[in-house]
Image: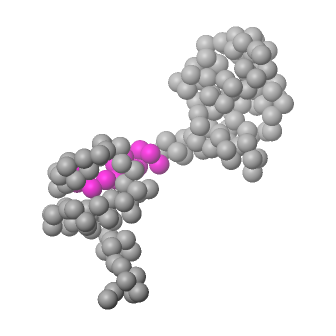
């Protein structure tokens, strides 16, 4: 995979397009005319309000001398990231069973419950009550809880 594409994965293609146009010292309106597109369409994409489509991506890639599929790949990675974020937002423990004070230093709605499971599990099992421990065990499952709460054999003494 293109190294630049690897670095930009998950970023809206419009943000990347805006940067590429700026690097060439072109205005968005001028660039839109070069590729025979409406400036409003280009503006909506560079502002992240509209998705990149295949025919537009091809015209842009040709004009900017970029690899075929560059912008559609970015669009796919961006959509995938957004979908994963939506799924993750729906996947969190039952907040009614967790005291806000347990997570005093952060907004519980902003915790990435999958990415930060080690910290969450350790905090709840160090400071939580039985209801909170039960909820976290229900959410992550017994094997994940054991992974992050059991001490290695050399620690038992």
- Give the residue at x 44% y 56%: 115
Mark yes or no: residue 36 visible: no
Q: What is the x, y in percent for residue 16?
A: 66, 30
Q: What is the x, y in percent for residue 143?
A: 36, 75
Residue 33's place in the image compared with 99, above or below, is: above
In the rendered view of the protein, which quadrant contains the C terminus?
A: bottom left
Compared across the picture, whether 155 is left or right of 57 comes to: left
Q: What is the x, y in percent for residue 27?
A: 72, 12
Q: Which residues are magenta?
A: 84-95
Compared across the picture, whether 112 is left or right of 94 comes to: right
Residue 109 in which image quadrant: top left
Residue 2's place in the image compared with 136, above or below, is: above
Looking at the image, what colour scheme do you see? one colour
Residue 145 in which image quadrant: bottom left
Mark yes or no: residue 69 visible: yes
- Give the residue at x 75% y 10%: 30
- Give the residue at x 80% y 34%: 66
Does the magenta run of residues contain 108? no
Q: Main secondary structure of the magenta part?
A: helix
Residue 118's place in the image compared with 34, above or below, is: below
Q: Nearer the viewer, residue 136 or 128?
A: 128
Q: How many numbered marks are there?
A: 0
Does the magenta run of residues contain 88? yes
Residue 93's place in the image compared with 50, above or below, is: below
Residue 20 in which image quadrant: top right
Q: Nearer the viewer, residue 111 or 155?
A: 155
Compared across the picture, whether 46 is left or right of 137 comes to: right
Q: What is the x, y in percent for residue 59?
A: 77, 26
- Give the residue at x 79% y 20%: 24
């Amino acid at each position: 995979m293109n190294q630049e594409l690897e670095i930009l994965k998950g970023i809206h293609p419009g943000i990347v397009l805006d940067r590429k146009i700026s690097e060439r010292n072109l205005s968005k309106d001028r660039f839109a005319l070069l590729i025979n597109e409406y400036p409003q369409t280009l503006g909506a994409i560079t502002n992240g309000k509209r998705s990149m489509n295949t025919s537009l991506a091809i015209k842009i890639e040709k004009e900017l001398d970029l690899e075929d599929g560059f912008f559609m790949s970015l669009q796919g990675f961006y959509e995938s990231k957004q979908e994963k974020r939506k799924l993750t937002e729906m996947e969190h423990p039952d907040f009614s069973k967790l005291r806000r004070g347990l997570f005093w230093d952060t907004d519980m709605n902003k915790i990435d419950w999958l990415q930060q499971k080690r910290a969450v599990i350790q905090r709840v099992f160090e400071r939580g009550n039985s209801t909170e421990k039960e909820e976290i065990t229900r959410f992550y499952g017994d094997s994940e809880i054991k992974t992050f709460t059991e001490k290695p054999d050399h620690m038992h003494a």
